[in-house]
Image: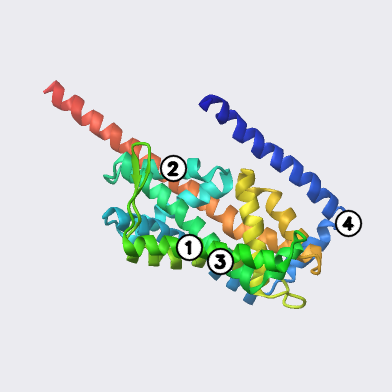
Amino acid sequence: MKKALEYVWPVIGLAAVGFSFWLLYRELKGISASEVLDSVAAISLHRWLLAVAATIVAYGALAWYDRIALLHLGRKLSWPVISLVSFTTYALSHNIGASVLSGAMVRFRAYGTMGLSIAEIGVLIALCSFTFVLGTVLLGGLILIGEPEIVLRLVDVPIWGTRLVGAGMLFLVALYVLGSWREFRPLKIGQFSIYYPRLRITARQLLAAPCEIIGAAGIIYFALPEAGNPGFFVILGVFLASFSAALISHAPGGLGVLEFVFMSAVPELDQSDVLAALLVFRLLYLLVPLAFSSVVVVLFERSRLAKTIQERLARNSSDAV
């Protein structure tokens, strides 16, 4: 069964990419490449700088995820080290897809050399993933209650039902906070016990995750033209829906899925402008970080290889003596 799943997820991801590209083709067949390039060129330097700043906020919050998990474990590492590991982890996992697995490999390799056990790294990965889910549920609940009409951009559902779902999402967040505050008994799954983080850890989670999501959505918001822009709250809600769909699809980098959902949800905007903003998002949030993280991985592995060779040579020379 386990071996079968190893083939199922890649097939699902490829199928999602293929289906999304077919849907995108239907949406974009009336848009020329020159129109998209003109839209990219029309983005002012001021808004480019704001988009870059939003990217820094997003990746800074992602580093905070790791910092929070390490605090939960009682481990202390320097901010530069945490930031480098986190940046590399998310830059690779966002592009490769199956973020839990691809991110796990980087963290096991990096944090393992810093003295963390396999169990500790497993807890760290789980808590980082949960922090993102917590932020998505929190922001999703607030948006569904405050701006329920956003859902009508994608599906036809009653407003009261949307608000009810939003209230349910916020109730789950409140229940998690209550469990942390009142120190509920750990949730047992087989031989494993999942403990509620301390309240100060939970408070940090409730700040870090929204910061990351807001920063990522801000990249697209600032890359869109000001004229006709539906506002940040709407863009944030649409981004949450499209980014969640991209993650669920298991498509590498959410390729095609993110674009289709986002463009379908903002029909009032010029589609070439929307596509240009999404290209800026992929450039700043995915491709540029991927390039830098690839260099980091190569340098790290090179240093580890050099250290291994030196240790082996030292052992050989001492054995010879």
Left or right, 239 with reference to 73: right
Residue identified by numbered label 3: 139
Image position, residue 308 (x, y; %):
29, 34
| Distance (Cα) linking label 2 and label 4 | 41 Å
Left or right, 306 with reference to 29: left
Helix, strand, or loop for circle 2? helix
| Distance (Cα) linking label 2 and label 1 | 26 Å
| Distance (Cα) linking label 4 and label 1 | 43 Å
Q: Is residue 260 visible?
A: yes
Within 10 Å of disc 4 (Cα), the crowding (few <14, some 14-19, many 20+) is few
State the residue lying farthest toward the right.
30
Residue identified by numbered label 4: 30
Within 10 Å of disc 3 (Cα), the crowding (few <14, some 14-19, many 20+) is many
Residue identified by numbered label 1: 173
Residue flagged by tag 2: what amino acid is it? Answer: Ala
Q: Quadrant of the N terminus?
A: top right
Front one among 85 and 102: 102
Within 10 Å of disc 2 (Cα), the crowding (few <14, some 14-19, many 20+) is some
Image position, residue 32 (x, y; %):
85, 57
Q: Can residue 212 be seen in this view?
A: no
| Distance (Cα) linking label 4 and label 3 | 34 Å
Q: Are marks 2 and 1 in contact (CB under 8 Å)?
A: no
